Image (cartoon, rainbow, N blue to C red):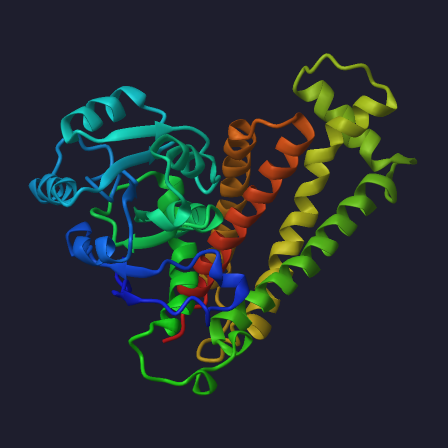
Amino acid sequence: MRHFKAGSFDKERVPTALRRFSPNESLHSLEEVDLHALKAAGKRLILLDVDNTLLPWKSQEIPASTTAWLQAARDLGFELCILSNTRNPERLEKLCESMKVDFIRDKFKPNPKMYHLAMEKYKMSPADCVMIGDQLFTDIWGANRAGIDAIWVRPLGKKEFIGTKLVSRNGERVVGRLLYRYFQAEGADAEDRPGFFRHEVVQQLLKFALVGGTVTVIDRGIHALFMFGLSFNGKPLKETVGTWVINSFNLGWPLDAKHLSDAAYAPLMFPGTMIAILVSYLLNRTFTFQVTDRKITGKQVAQFYIVALIGMLISVFVGTVANRLADRNPVLDWVAGSAVGIVAGFIWNFNAQRLWTFKQK
């Protein structure tokens, strides 16, 4: 993370929309965590993330610096507990045994359940605990939801899960830049700071969302027109397309209205999606990012389409994973998966279009 900064945050002045992601401080490494200061602040239980906090992602080797820090914490009387939703419990057990640290494995962060389980296990209150982790949207957000102070540390390495790299880290760049304006060490008075909605990146984010809503209406409208308003050779277009799909792919479906409509749904979505992406490109170029230093080129349009299509794949992938991990009921799982997928795709699209397609010279 090239733009990572170390310092403490004035959480009282952080806008409400950002406060859930705000740590108490950010540090370049675990070794910079001041154990004596934590002790003086009344902390007795240190909760820890594993990958890229204690050791590199997927590594089996525990750095000597981590081992020394853990021992120093134990010498000062701290209880230590790792919180993890890893899909590789054997590796977690082996690492925890080597580090001589207990662990709790449960619902994925930022769900606060693991934090509450840790407090129950050690009979601690939120004021007695501190969470240390490398991700704002899991470790820090989860700690804030549980009422626990949090320390955000810079990731130990660049290798990590592809979803984390593409979605979470891009989101952290946006949120982190906004949070960095609320370092306690900085001398600017509150009235000298621009309001939350006056930050350029926030204005771009809101414009991007507005454009997204507009092109969604266009996309859905064109799809509805193709599905219900157009005819071909005297028959509804969806019947013609649906018949072609069923026969061409040997689906074996009956040629009734329901199956013809189902078969035509995806093919008839394609024209509207392509048009909506083009409208999105033009609006984001002139309205969101206000590009003036270069002409429209085929290369730039292609970049926009590539980013948008990758965003669709990310949205589907993340939404599917979130739906799989949720465990309430099918309807709520679908809603949660869809929402998380949309947010993931939005974060990718905004950052990739801003930093690649429309990057200013």
In the displayed structure image, the side of residue 329 where residue 119 appears, left or right:
left
Q: Position of residue 345 (x, y in %)?
A: 52, 48
Up the image or down, 175 lies above or below 147; here it is below
Classify the position of the C terminus by image quarter. bottom left
Q: Position of residue 193 (x, y in %)?
A: 44, 82
Is residue 167 among the parts visible in the rendering?
no
Up the image or down, 113 lies above or below 189; here it is above
In the displayed structure image, the side of residue 38 where residue 122 appears, left or right:
right
Q: Quadrant of residue 192?
A: bottom left
Seen from the viewer's position, the closer of residues 95 and 88 is: 95
| Image point (81%, 39%), residue name | 227
Seen as rendered, the residue at the extreme right is 234
Seen from the viewer's position, the closer of residues 295 and 124 is: 124
Q: Position of residue 46 (x, y in %)?
A: 28, 43
Q: Position of residue 153 (x, y in %)?
A: 26, 53
Up the image or down, 39 lies above or below 97; here it is below
Seen as rendered, the residue at the extreme top is 252
Up the image or down, 207 lies above or below 32; here it is below
Seen from the viewer's position, the closer of residues 63 and 354 is: 63
| Image point (48%, 76%), residue name | 199
